[in-house]
């Protein structure tokens, strides 16, 4: 080829190459951002966050149109044909780990978490302080779970406590929880109390678990009827007052989101108590399809979604914004918690739940 043509030909080839690269790059991006529907299973505690229009709009920027069905975390892990879904989003690592292993999924996402806490009332909390069961920490309280477990196993009633002018009723001292057979918040309560009952050691075998059952079963059986969703006992706390719900096991996020809303649902007499020790519920998304993985990645890495999670009371990777949110809303929560334990493995926790379930008789 004549040299004078080589330069122009190479230029044309370069232009064609660059054009092709741009074409395929743009096509790939458009394909990635094409909106697809991702359907999954999630616990009720994340319902408001996942339905918020700001969250849905942010996810659409990632090409994701979100839909979901609500179910208890234990139900998600045991009672659904997961081949019909793109993702599961239970509360708590044990259920998520079971799903991940059984579905052969190599990774999961933990976009936010929340400590377990106890919703109570200032007169109740002050009575517990007077009886050596709790400590006031500024605008929140800590609750000694070992001492509380002793009282529960002794069948102690509120009327047995000293310095109790406001709640000297003939009811057993118990924390109201959700149904241990269905709900993660109850499972986390069980995990916490099993640690305390086991001499401040994580229960590591079924044999250890069964030895603790006489102590642990009363925590749930003595409550009578319990709801499957974490929403229900918290609603009782908000609506029915101290008489119905003196102590309620909740997710910290529930109390935070209602307090920050400043709509009058949280009154001056309502207080938050942190179990000592406490346990985190890590909201863990397990992807079942590539689109489910895209959702997990977006929730975990998108800065706006991380901040929105905080607006709904969750603690996310954006710790600076959480501290700012707490200060701006004058929230009665510690910015960080130190005395935090891990739950037992799914198999050990499940074995305790199954044995307690048998005692219900249905």
Image: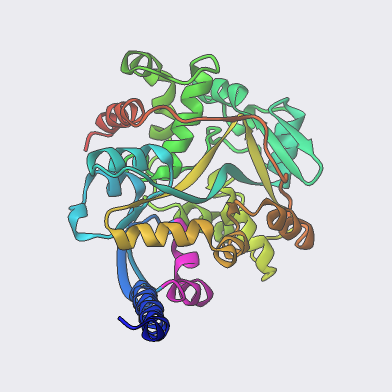
Query: Where's residue 113, x and y in %?
Result: 54, 48
Query: Where's residue 166, x and y in %?
Result: 71, 43
State the quadrant of the C terminus. top left
Query: Where's residue 241, x and y in %?
Result: 60, 55
State the quadrant of the N terminus. bottom left
- Give the quadrant of residue 47: bottom left
- Give the quadrant of residue 261: bottom right
Q: How is the image coloured?
A: rainbow
Q: Nearer the viewer, residue 208 or 316?
A: 316
Q: Is residue 335 left or right of residue 236?
A: right
Q: Is residue 58 left or right of residue 169?
A: left
Residue at image location 36% in from the left, 43% down from the top: 96
Q: Nearer the viewer, residue 69 or 362?
A: 69
Magenta span main SS: helix
Q: Which residues are magenta?
A: 45-62
User: Is residue 163 at least partly visible in the picture?
Assistant: no
- Give the quadrant of residue 200: top right
Q: In the rendered image of this protein, does residue 232 appear above or below residue 75?
A: below
Query: Where's residue 173, x and y in %?
Result: 56, 33
Q: Is residue 127 magenta?
A: no
């Amino acid at each position: 080829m004549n040299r004078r043509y080589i330069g122009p030909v190479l230029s044309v080839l370069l232009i064609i190459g660059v054009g092709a690269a741009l074409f395929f790059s743009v096509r790939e991006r458009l394909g990635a951002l094409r909106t697809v529907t991702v359907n999954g299973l999630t616990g009720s505690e994340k319902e408001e966050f996942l339905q918020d229009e700001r969250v849905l709009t942010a996810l659409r920027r990632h090409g994701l149109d979100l839909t979901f069905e609500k179910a208890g975390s234990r139900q998600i892990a045991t009672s659904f044909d997961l081949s019909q879904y793109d993702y599961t989003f239970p509360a708590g690592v044990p259920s998520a780990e079971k799903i991940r292993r059984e579905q052969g999924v190599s990774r999961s996402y933990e976009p936010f978490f929340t400590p377990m806490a106890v919703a109570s009332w200032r007169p109740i909390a002050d009575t517990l302080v007077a009886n050596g069961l709790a400590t006031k920490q500024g605008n929140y309280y800590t609750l000694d779970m070992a001492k509380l477990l002793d009282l529960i196993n002794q069948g102690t009633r509120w009327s047995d406590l000293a310095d109790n002018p406001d709640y000297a009723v003939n009811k057993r001292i118990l924390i109201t929880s959700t149904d241990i057979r269905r709900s993660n918040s109850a499972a986390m309560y069980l995990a916490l109390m099993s640690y305390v009952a086991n001499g401040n050691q994580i229960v590591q075998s079924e044999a250890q678990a069964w030895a603790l059952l006489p102590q642990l079963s009363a925590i749930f059986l003595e409550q009578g009827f319990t709801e499957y969703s974490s929403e229900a006992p918290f609603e009782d706390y908000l609506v029915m007052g101290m008489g119905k719900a003196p102590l309620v096991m909740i997710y910290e996020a529930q109390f935070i989101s209602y307090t920050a809303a400043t709509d009058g649902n949280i009154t001056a007499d309502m207080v938050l108590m942190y179990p000592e020790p406490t346990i985190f519920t890590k909201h863990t998304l397990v992807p079942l399809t590539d689109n489910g993985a895209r959702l997990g990645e977006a929730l975990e890495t998108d800065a706006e979604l991380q901040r929105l999670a905080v607006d709904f009371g969750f603690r996310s990777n954006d710790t600076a914004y959480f501290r700012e949110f707490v200060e701006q809303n004058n929230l009665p929560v510690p910015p960080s918690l130190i005395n935090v334990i891990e739950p037992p493995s799914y198999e050990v926790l499940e074995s305790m739940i199954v044995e307690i379930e048998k005692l219900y008789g249905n």
